[in-house]
Image (cartoon, coloured by chain):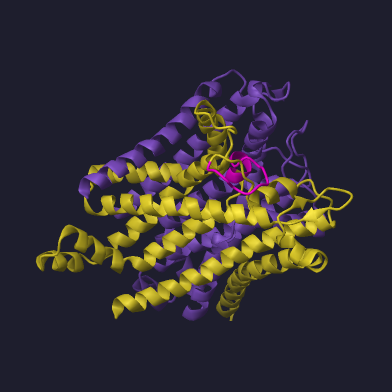
Amino acid sequence: MRWTLRILSYAVFLAMLFVLVSIVVSGLPYLFRPGFFTAWPRRAMSEGGIFPMLVGSLMLMALVFAISIPVGLVGTIFLSEIAPRKFSLFLQSLAATMNSVPSIVYGVFGLALFCIKLNFGTSLISASLTLSTMSIPFFMNSAVEFLRAVPKELREGVISLGANKLQATLMVLRASRNGILTSLMLTLGRAFSETAPILVTGAVFYSTRLPGKLTDPVMTLPTSIYAIVMNLGESSQWMAKGMASLMVLIMMFIYSVVQITRRNKRE
Amino acid sequence: MMRKTVSFIFVSLTSLAAVVVAAALFAIVFFIFSESVPAIKEVGLGLFSPNWYPVWEVEPEFGIGTMLLNSLILSVWTSVWVWTIGLGVAIYLHKYALNKERELILRVLEYVSGIPSVVLGLFGVLILGNWFLRLGAWSAQNFLNASIVLSVLTLPFMVSLTFQSLEKVPRQLTEGAIALGAKDLAVTWIELKHAAAGIVNAMLTVFNRIFGETMIVLMVAGGANMLLKSLLDPVRPLTATLGSEIGEVAVGSLHYSVLFFIAFLVLTGCLILNVLSNMITRKLERWIKG
């Protein structure tokens, strides 16, 4: 049994390594082409660079952060510090359920609510609100565990010294800052790599300018990868490979940070 | 007085945030259901017929039967593979692996779990697709290709969730069993039984992710709306139709409403799986504790 399982595990390991390496390596050379990060795509994406997609993704991330981190953090504080235990567990199970809802469902919901009912159209703001709807429960679900792990004595000690609830909470936040950072990075990564919701609510395949206001549509890295692979021929595929490689490298960076924070905490 | 006001504002602000989040789930269910009401009223049971010709002007048909069936076949087939392989790898990591091996394998799996699904789709189309053509498949994008890519997406979850619940099995239990003379296989069985709640949870999570995944099936499954006959046939699961058509449909049309019905179906499936997972977990925990 030991050897069967060992062979199986090694096979899985090698296959996974192959997927990872082949994606990174096949796109890596293109990242060093002059102008890859600073030029606009030309000739049906067969020349030029990924400047507008990169900026679009960054703008989207910035908005998702601005919306979901404050709300998520405040909600997490409610779950761990204020709500009665039963209610808190109920809310947490709702958040866990929301985490398991497929992303396309969020996209369809965002389309109906933000694009059509609120009349934002296919736009940066619709996409970032949709992604935030998804990110907030994800963040809460992950961060609340870290806040709960802070020992009770700390809270009681601070309060017995005359601090009010707000000051005690700030103390708890400071004690769990590593965990909060971890949740933040994971939320960022999830929002960055999600494609289906943006595809439905905010992305266009090609736009001649960067979004200047919130109601402009946006080009992003993941949706452009999809569009190139599905619609364009071989002469444009290098750009999709380059973007895929870049996205995987960014995700690996995020997970490395998470792994390092986790190890620091353990030591 | 001042302190009380600060506390009050703080408490009400935080509770507001949590309630908004809870309300979002109900809003999602409500919105998607209300948009799919016209489809349920007008098409009725025709929704489950096998023919899908939504933009045919003479006599449009909105049957999602074939797509639903293909979705289910794809999800079950892929899940069974992922469950078996994932369980095997997790047992290996838990029982036999050296520390170095374990760390290396888990780290690579974690990186793979971070690969965006659209990038895995690209991998399926550009790399696996070519292999399939070279091996003689008639379509580069097909059922088996999608199934392989979906396995890459979900195996890391299966392995790490199962591994974590195996690690939580108390040492004394394992050592007690060994001390009583239990064989390797019997010890593993005891550990698995103790970790059953976590494992079942992992299995349902995996199934749910496969059933709801959109980008991969949209790019890799092939997109032909016909019932699967061989593993190399191109298929079109529910979510692929949803993802590709919702962006181009006329708002308010019957087609639009039917697409919302598909979303509602996917959402309902996910919610049912969640309830099921909670129930089974609770039952199993009672079973273990006796």
Residue at image coords 42%, 51%: B82
Towards the viewer: B147 or A24: B147
Which range is magenta?
B216-231
Residue at image coords 68%, 35%: A227
Residue B165 horizontal/vertical position (percent): 33, 62
Towards the viewer: B265 or A138: B265
Left or right position of A244 against B95: right
Q: Main secondary structure of the magenta part?
A: loop
Towards the viewer: B113 or A220: B113
The outermost residue toward the top is A34
Chain with yellow colouring: B
Q: Is residue A143 visible?
A: yes
Q: Residue B172 occupies which quadrant of the picture?
A: bottom left
Residue B256 horizontal/vertical position (percent): 79, 55
* Relative vertical location of residue A255 with respect to residue B26 in this rendering, above or below: above
Left or right position of B140 against A149: right
* Relative vertical location of residue A177 with respect to residue B9 in this rendering, above or below: above
Residue at image coords 58%, 51%: B213
Instruction: Specify the colour of chain A.
Output: purple
